[in-house]
Image: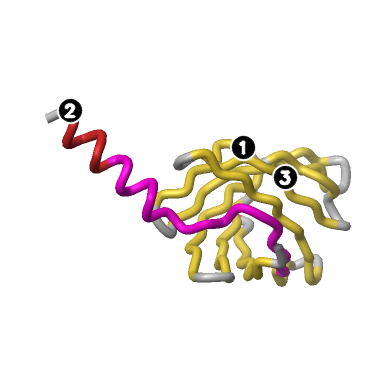
Amino acid sequence: MRVFLLLALSALTALAADINGTWKGSAETPNGTIERTFVFKTDGASVTGETVSEMMGKSVIKNGKLEGDSLTFSIDVKFQDNEMTLNYKGKVSGDTIKLTVEGPNNLTFEYTAKKTS
């Protein structure tokens, strides 16, 4: 039974989308268009890396998971002297990731990111 579970988990990891590399995206927010660069590194289902935007600077990717084509992670940002956590959920499809970002006070917006390298 244990061998079967290990094989099943290995198969799921093998089927995960390949997001390693650099992705560039944009989102429309109440404060205008935000462009953000994501650099993802995967180790099995674990996702790490960083993200940079002109408006909010550089942030480290935390709690990242990639299960099949589903991606989740969070980042901490500082905007107008306010620190906040943004939670990302998305779907990978080839060289595109569609992400929904949730922040404080029911703030929600959508990113579309394209792989650049």
The coloring applied to the image is: secondary structure
Q: Which mark is residue 62?
A: 1
Give the label, 3 or 1, closer to the camera. Answer: 3
The residue positioned 76% from the left and 42% from the top of the image is 59
Residue stretch rendered in magenta on the structure: 9-26
Residue 115 vs residue 34, the one in the foreground: 115
Q: Residue sitting at 64 percent across and 66 percent down?
A: 111
- CA gap between label 1 and label 2 equals 30 Å
Q: x%, y% of residue 96?
A: 58, 70
Q: Position of residue 81 (x, y in %)?
A: 87, 41
Q: Which residue is mark 3?
A: 50
Tell us which disc is closer to us: 1 or 2: 2
Q: Nearer the viewer, residue 51 or 32?
A: 51
User: Type of residue at label 2?
Assistant: Arg
Question: Disc 2 marks which residue?
Answer: 2
Q: Is residue 30 above or below residue 4?
A: below
Q: Secondary structure at mark 3?
A: strand
